[in-house]
Image: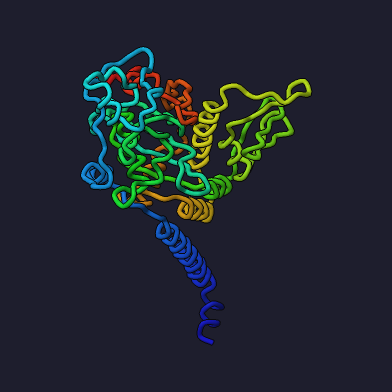
């Protein structure tokens, strides 16, 4: 009764109390939801330096040292036809003649203070192979960020297996001495010469959820397009809004065909086009993250990301969100991008791989003066 009398005789005060109560209640609810989202992020042990030492000292894994003389050649000259299983065997065969190695596969060390480096990895359904590998570099000098896609079939040194393997195999880890994230980071460091500061990876289903939570993306095609392997199909031409499942097929497409004059024709350079498509999707998502329509929308997006990514153990979800927030609204023109120069090769055991054709340092120096 007392409450009813108070409302009757003090309607404005009662209304104010009610509104404030609702606001505080909703605020507490959204804060709770965000805290739940932040708490469910999976992490993985990540200490590449320690993992490298463990691999070098392991009784099971003894890695032969890479060539110590860094001479850059116009053409890759790594002698794969020798049918030798490891660098150690090749060293025994040729002695001190380091010219038999493709030295473009080894990076000249770059000081850790030059860049803040982030490795972004998209995994296949198994979670043990990297389908997408993007290295993002932020110069500590304040210059424009740099982004490069590393081909998953890049043939580089694998410290765990004591030989060259595809880059994407690193995510399988190295027994009990290195996690998948650590071995992949070590392989990227050996190739680029740049220490990897942080790593984030997302699986196929997670990527689709993130795209849906962000409202989808826009893609444009000049002709009907399909990719039977990635289940991509665009029957209409022009620009169109797509959801997560179609976006996943779009970024995974490596065997795209276009319908021209009634005939399906393979699109040339599909792998590098695929890398560009993946980067463009990231730019679209960054642009859409620049504004949030409501606290609920923010919560949904955080929850979608939190349940879909795995971060390295040294990088909390809050820190990752802060880093991403710093780049919200970033566009293609704000970032320096380049593609890895490669040469197609088929190994003696029949595997199709990509040999680095130029040292990474040489390509990077054309965009950022390394001194």
Q: Nearer the viewer, residue 158 or 291?
A: 158
Residue 367 visible within the image: no
Question: Height in image: 24 above or below 129?
Answer: below
Of all residues, the one furthest to the top in this rendering is: 74
Q: Position of residue 229 (x, y in %)?
A: 63, 38
Q: Position of residue 341 (x, y in %)?
A: 43, 20
Residue at (51% x, 74% y) in the render: 10
Question: Height in image: 9 above or below 95?
Answer: below
Q: Is residue 29 left or right of residue 371?
A: right
Residue 151, by quadrant, is top left
Residue at (41% x, 42% y) in the render: 324
Quarter holding the N terminus? Answer: bottom right
Q: Is residue 4 left or right of residue 180?
A: right
Question: Height in image: 154 above or below 52?
Answer: above
Residue 159, by quadrant, is top left
Q: Position of residue 246 (x, y in %)?
A: 63, 41
Q: Nearer the viewer, residue 191 or 115?
A: 191
Q: Nearer the viewer, residue 224 or 4?
A: 224
Question: Height in image: 342 above or below 38?
Answer: above
Of all residues, the one furthest to the bottom in this rendering is: 1
Quarter holding the C terminus? Answer: top left
């Amino acid at each position: 009764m007392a409450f009813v009398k108070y409302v009757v005789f003090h309607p404005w005060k009662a209304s104010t109390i009610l509104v404030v109560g609702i606001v505080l209640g909703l605020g507490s609810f959204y804060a709770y939801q965000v805290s739940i989202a932040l708490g469910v992020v999976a992490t993985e042990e990540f200490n590449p330096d320690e993992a490298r030492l463990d691999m070098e000292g392991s009784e099971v894994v003894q890695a032969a040292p890479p060539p110590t003389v860094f001479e850059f050649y116009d053409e890759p000259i790594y002698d794969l036809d020798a049918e030798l299983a490891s660098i150690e065997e090749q060293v025994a065969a040729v002695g001190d003649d380091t010219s038999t190695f493709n030295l473009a596969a080894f990076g000249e060390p770059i000081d850790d203070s030059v860049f803040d480096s982030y490795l972004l990895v998209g995994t296949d359904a198994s979670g043990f192979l990297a389908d997408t590998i993007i290295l993002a570099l932020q110069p500590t000098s304040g210059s424009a960020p740099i982004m490069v896609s590393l081909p998953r079939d890049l043939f580089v040194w694998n410290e765990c297996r004591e030989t060259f393997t595809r880059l994407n195999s690193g995510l399988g880890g190295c027994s009990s001495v290195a996690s998948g994230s650590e071995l992949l980071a070590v392989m990227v460091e050996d190739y680029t010469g740049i220490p990897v500061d942080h790593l984030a990876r997302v699986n196929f289903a997670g990527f689709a959820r993130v795209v849906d939570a962000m409202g989808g993306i826009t893609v444009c095609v000049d002709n009907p397009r399909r990719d039977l392997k990635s289940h991509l199909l665009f029957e209409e031409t022009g620009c169109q809004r797509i959801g997560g499942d179609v976006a996943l097929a779009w970024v995974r497409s490596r065997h795209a065909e276009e319908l021209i004059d009634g005939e399906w024709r393979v699109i040339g350079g599909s792998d590098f086009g695929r890398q560009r498509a993946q980067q463009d999707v990231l730019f679209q998502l960054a642009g859409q993250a620049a504004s949030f329509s409501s606290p609920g929308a923010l919560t949904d997006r955080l929850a979608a990301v939190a349940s879909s990514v795995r971060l390295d153990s040294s990088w909390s979800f809050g820190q990752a969100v802060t880093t991403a927030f710093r780049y919200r609204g970033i566009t293609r023109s704000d970032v320096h991008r380049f593609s890895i120069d490669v040469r197609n090769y088929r190994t003696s055991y029949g595997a199709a791989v990509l040999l680095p054709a130029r040292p990474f340092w040489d390509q990077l120096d054309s965009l950022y003066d390394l001194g």
